């Protein structure tokens, strides 16, 4: 199986949305949808890569590095291509880019189901967690 890893293009957005939906990772379209992806392209701190095979996107990874902290926010691989090291290749590629930008460490947001994958790649569980709030100050959650 031959695939390439390359930077995200806006034309990839719909394929990525389909992958996210299949993997149950499309809970916040305003953060993960095509409009958000268009904003990401304009943001210098973002690293957004896709794995492509035969002109089809089969996986993606999105990370940021703000000059101090690097974080992987999203990794998703088409279900039929999982357990074939595509996710691992995407992680290694994004870490390489983040390291070249000066990131001393990389953290990742995970859930219980994915923690084992990340542990195998050398990530360690920290005693912190992520909290979320809508930016609309008038909205109550």
Image: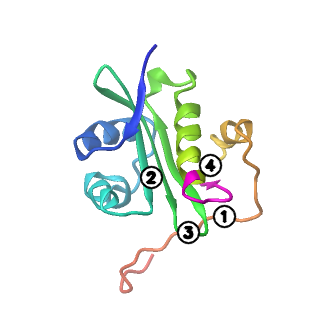
* 137 w.r.t. 22: above or below: below
Q: How far apart are marks 2 and 1 (CA)?
A: 22 Å
Callout 2 secondary element? strand
In the picture, the disc for residue 47 is 2
Q: In this view, does 11 lie to the left or right of 30?
A: left
Q: For mark 3, does the 10 Å Cα neighbourhood hold few (<14), some (14 to 19), or many (20 or more) residues?
A: few
Q: For mark 1, does the 10 Å Cα neighbourhood hold few (<14), some (14 to 19), or many (20 or more) residues?
A: few
Query: Which is more foreground, mark 4 or mark 3?
Result: 3
Callout 3 secondary element? loop
Q: How is the image coloured?
A: rainbow
Q: How far apart are marks 2 and 4 (CA)?
A: 21 Å
Q: Which of marks 4 and 3 is nearer the N terminus?
A: 3
Question: Which residue shows up at 57% across the image and 44% down it?
Answer: 96
Does 12 appear in magenta?
A: no
Q: For mark 2, does the 10 Å Cα neighbourhood hold few (<14), some (14 to 19), or many (20 or more) residues?
A: many
Q: How far apart are marks 2 and 3 (CA)?
A: 13 Å
Q: Earlier in the sequence, mark 2 or mark 3?
A: 2
Label 1 belongs to which residue?
129
Q: Distance between the residues labelled 1 and 4?
A: 10 Å
Query: Which is more foreground, mark 1 or mark 3?
Result: 3
* Magenta segment: 100-109
Label 4 belongs to which residue?
111
Question: Which residue shows up at 46% across the image and 13% down it?
Answer: 1
Question: Farthest residue toward the left?
Answer: 11
Query: Which is more foreground, mark 2 or mark 4?
Result: 2
Q: Which of marks 1 and 4 is nearer the N terminus?
A: 4
Q: Which of marks 2 and 4 is nearer the N terminus?
A: 2
* 3 w.r.t. 141: above or below: above
Label 3 belongs to which residue?
67
Quadrant location of the C terminus in the rendered image? bottom left
* 119 w.r.t. 31: above or below: above
């Amino acid at each position: 199986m031959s695939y390439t890893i390359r930077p995200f293009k806006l034309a990839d957005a719909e394929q990525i949305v389909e992958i996210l939906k299949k993997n149950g990772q499309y809970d916040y379209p305003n953060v993960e949808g095509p409009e958000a992806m268009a904003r990401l392209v304009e943001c210098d701190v973002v690293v957004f890569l896709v794995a492509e095979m035969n002109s089809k996107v089969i996986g993606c990874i999105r990370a940021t590095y703000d000059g101090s902290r690097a974080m992987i926010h999203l990794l998703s691989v088409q279900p039929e291509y999982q357990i074939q090291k595509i996710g691992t290749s995407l992680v290694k590629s994004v870490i390489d880019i983040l390291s070249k930008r000066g990131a001393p460490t990389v953290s990742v947001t995970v859930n219980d189901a994915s923690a084992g994958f990340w542990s195998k790649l050398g990530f360690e569980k920290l005693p912190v967690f992520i909290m979320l709030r809508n930016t609309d100050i008038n909205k109550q959650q």
